[in-house]
Image: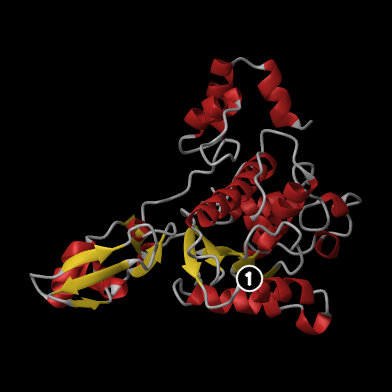
Amino acid sequence: MHLLCHIRRFVSLAALVTVLGAVLPGGAAQAAVAWAHGSPAPNGVPRGPAPPFDSSLLSSLDLQAAANEQYGPHARLVGDWKHLYGLRVQLGNHLHNLDVARAVRKELGTGWTVAAVGPTASDWRGFHVGALHNQTVAVMLIASDQLNDVSGVRQALAHYASVLDVDYVWYKLRATVAPRFTTPLIVPTSIDSATWANLSTSSADDTHRYDLFNAELNAMEAWVPYPNTRYRSVVAPYAGVRPDLWLGAADGGPVAAGVPRETSVACDPAAPLSSQCSDASYAIGHELGHAYGLKHSCDAYPQYSNCADSIMQTGKPMGAILLPPEIAHLQASPFLH
């Protein structure tokens, strides 16, 4: 049982909230109450000290106003609000498609792009990409045959957030700084679950090592621009509940790419991690380290006899370490706080 569990066993609730409030930013004290009680979230994922997901760059949209702007004052929204693409615009006896990207441009202006925070029509948002400053944009890609499974996508978002939760807490404990994740966005893709699965398993072959990464990057860029010097991205695909798909995590400069396992397991940093959660948080945490400028530990710092225990080598949360120069690098990085 790691340090967090010892804290929860031997410290009073009030003291726990005070301690975590001093250590973790952005609502962690409130999160500690749920953590200490061990209460499950409504979706079944255990609550932990959640990372302070940044929603400040998201804006809701007036879709009815968008329908009127696009089709006139007599247009009205009809259809199914329970699905992302379920809405239509009725004008007389005719139905038309609603251009949500146009709605974002008209309502919010330049520097904004279309985004979604879930699988229903009420989850459409504008995302102020032009205002990103040192955040890590969290993205979950949705297989084409999974998008209409609303409960499945919501559960996958909770799973993905729980893995990011583990990495946030782990980085905070080891380096005293942690990523500033945005609220996870979903991006529908044209790739079905079977193809995502094949991309993952085939990455064991060196000739196809980066096929999954390249597919993730291409799918992400349909909605979220490739990161520049102002932000980083972390991405993982949802291809149904597939915790068995663990191959193919990779990085490409500012992008950390995970695998389907990261959207398929429920993790809690306040409890002993299962082997799948440890692997999932290692995959994301390791690739994030690369995105923040870290190299493989034993290559960069062979003078440290414990270099293999670093997350940048083979160490897995929560027991993984960071070497002193890795900690110094992260503490100097603008992408962690």
x then y, percent, for residue 122: 33, 56
In the image, 225: left or right of 127?
Answer: right
How many numbered marks does the figure carry? 1
Q: Quick check: 135 left or right of 309?
A: left
Can you tell which quarter of the image residue 73 is in? Answer: bottom left
Q: Is residue 226 visible?
A: no
Question: Compared with residue 288, is residue 68 higher up or lower down, i.e. above or below?
Answer: below
Q: Position of residue 138 (x, y in %)?
A: 52, 59
Residue 49 in the figure: left or right of residue 259: left
Quadrant (top left/top right/bottom left/bottom right) for the N terminus: top right
Whether residue 332 is visible here, answered yes or no, is yes
Provide residue 252's location: percent of width, then percent of height: 64, 73
The outermost residue toward the left is: 73
Describe the element under mark 1 as helix, strand or loop: helix
Residue at (65, 60) in percent of width and height: 288
In the current view of this chain or complex, which residue is farthest to the right? 305
Q: Nearer the viewer, residue 274 or 333?
A: 274
Q: Amino acid at mark 1?
A: Ser
Residue pushed farthest bottom? 207
Residue under the point 36% across and 69% down: 114
Residue at point 52% right, 62% down? 139
The colour style of the image is secondary structure
Q: Residue at horizontal 88%, vertical 60%?
A: 302
Structural crowding at the residue carrying mark 1, measured as other residues with C-alpha within 10 Å and reported as few (<14), some (14–19) or many (≥20): many
**291 w.r.t. 27: above or below:** below
Residue to which mark 1 is pinned: 193
- Measured from the top left, where is residue 128 in percent x and y? 35, 64
Of 114 and 108, which appears nearest the observer? 114
